[in-house]
Amino acid sequence: MLSALSALLVFQLAGEVLARSLNLPIPGPVIGMLMLFVALVLRGGPGEELKTTGQNLLQHLSLLFVPAGTGIMVHLHRVSDEWLPLLVSLLVSTLATLVVTALVMKLCQPSPAASGEKP
Amino acid sequence: MTQDISQIWVYLSASPLLGLTITLLAYQLAFALYRRSGSNPLANPVLIAVFILVLFLTLTATSYETYFAGAQFVHFLLGPATVALAIPLYTQFRRVRSMLLPVFAGLFAGSLTAIVSAVLVARLLGASTSTQLSLAPKSVTTPIAMGVAERIGGIPSLTAVLVIVTGILGAVGARFVFDAMKLRDPAIRGFAIGIASHGIGTARAFQVNEQSGAFAALAMGMNGALTAMLVPWIAAYLMNIG
């Protein structure tokens, strides 16, 4: 578990360094994810340890958003003037994004057999 | 006795231990409720845990800074967890490779829809220009969204709130949308959640299905990069036609 955690941190650090030195608009951890992905493809997959540690971390991914989510209490007053247009906009836009993305993907899907429908 | 309790409170409220402990307790309670509801998306654990914590902090008059001094240890794990998303992505690589066309088509269509629809609906309802600009990057992960908002003249702290609400809305609503569309493919469901509601949506996708989670992670990463590039152009265009 320790070596796996170190590996994840090393990739995050490398991603952070790359993002800052090249002035990329993408956060370091996302670049670290891409680099680890490339490393896994080159190595032919994660070892048992990395696999287990990754699963443990991702199992409770929601927990990790809670501290940032609670930060909503600091900025909530910004929303108060225009809460109605904001809420409607977020609702409409989130639903539209889900529907459009899914529909476009379904239309571009090469084989309709994959959807499990019978002719 | 009350003297003692208040002294203990003075100690606890200044120590990171309290913030960390209540974060874990609130989440465990929220997660237990979520499980008891039969994993109903309406009982989203992030939503419930945040609600409990905001209530607790408000009632005890604890500042967010004090709370975060402890909660940052949980927050910090977001970095390595994001890196770890490469593992399910690798596991699902074959499926991803067989779906390159739908993946890229969905990415562009979804990314554009997320940006343009948010700005236009807010404008129709009379929101101010800076509010419209703060909405444009709302579907991507917080650090990217705040950076973009700042660059185009939005309000980064408002964007941070909008990003979290968007994440929760997508995590809560996605199942109902997809079921109504009779869409079953876990890859497409996951990818669409990742485009619309970044990490919070991805976390929900992982709770449902590993393939959904992997596609959500992929979508979140790709949409973060694309939105960072697209929003400045689109925002400039939309502000001109208004």
Image: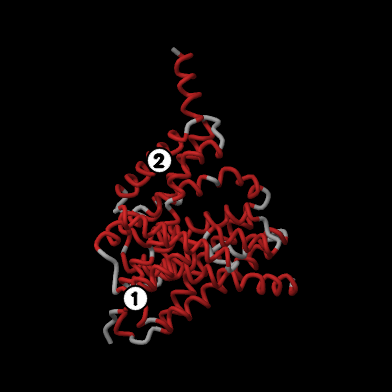
Left or right: where B47 falls relative to B94 = right
> Which residue appears at 52% of the width and 54% of the height?
B164
Disc 2 crowd rating (10 Å Cα; few below 14, some 14-19, many 20+) is many
Mark nearest the camera among 2 and 1 is: 1
Residue B117 occupies which quadrant of the picture? bottom right
What is the total number of numbered labels drawn onto the structure image? 2
Q: CA distance from mark 2 to mark 1?
A: 41 Å
Left or right: where A13 falls relative to A55 = right
> Which residue appears at 45% of the width and 15% of the height?
B4
Q: Is the residue B73 above or below the residue B190 in the image?
A: above
Task: Report the front residue among B46 and A83.
Answer: B46
Secondary structure beneath disc 1?
Answer: helix
Asked if the residue under mark 1 is in contact with the one under mark 2, i.e. CB atoms within 8 Å, the reply is no
Left or right: where A114 falls relative to B79 = left
The chain under label 1 reads A
The chain under label 2 reads B
Regarding residue B140, the answer to whether it shows in the image is no
Secondary structure beneath disc 2?
Answer: helix
> Which residue appears at 29% of the width and 81% of the height?
A117
Regarding residue B106, the answer to whether it shows in the image is yes
Residue beneath label 1, please?
Answer: A42
Where does residue B39 sit, x and y in percent of width and height? 32, 54
Q: Is the residue B78 above or below the residue B242 in the image?
A: above
**Kind of residue sitting beneath label 2:** Ala
Residue farthest toward the left in the current orientation of the protein: A48
On-image quarter of the C terminus of chain A = bottom left
Residue beneath label 2, please?
Answer: B26
Residue A41 occupies which quadrant of the picture? bottom left
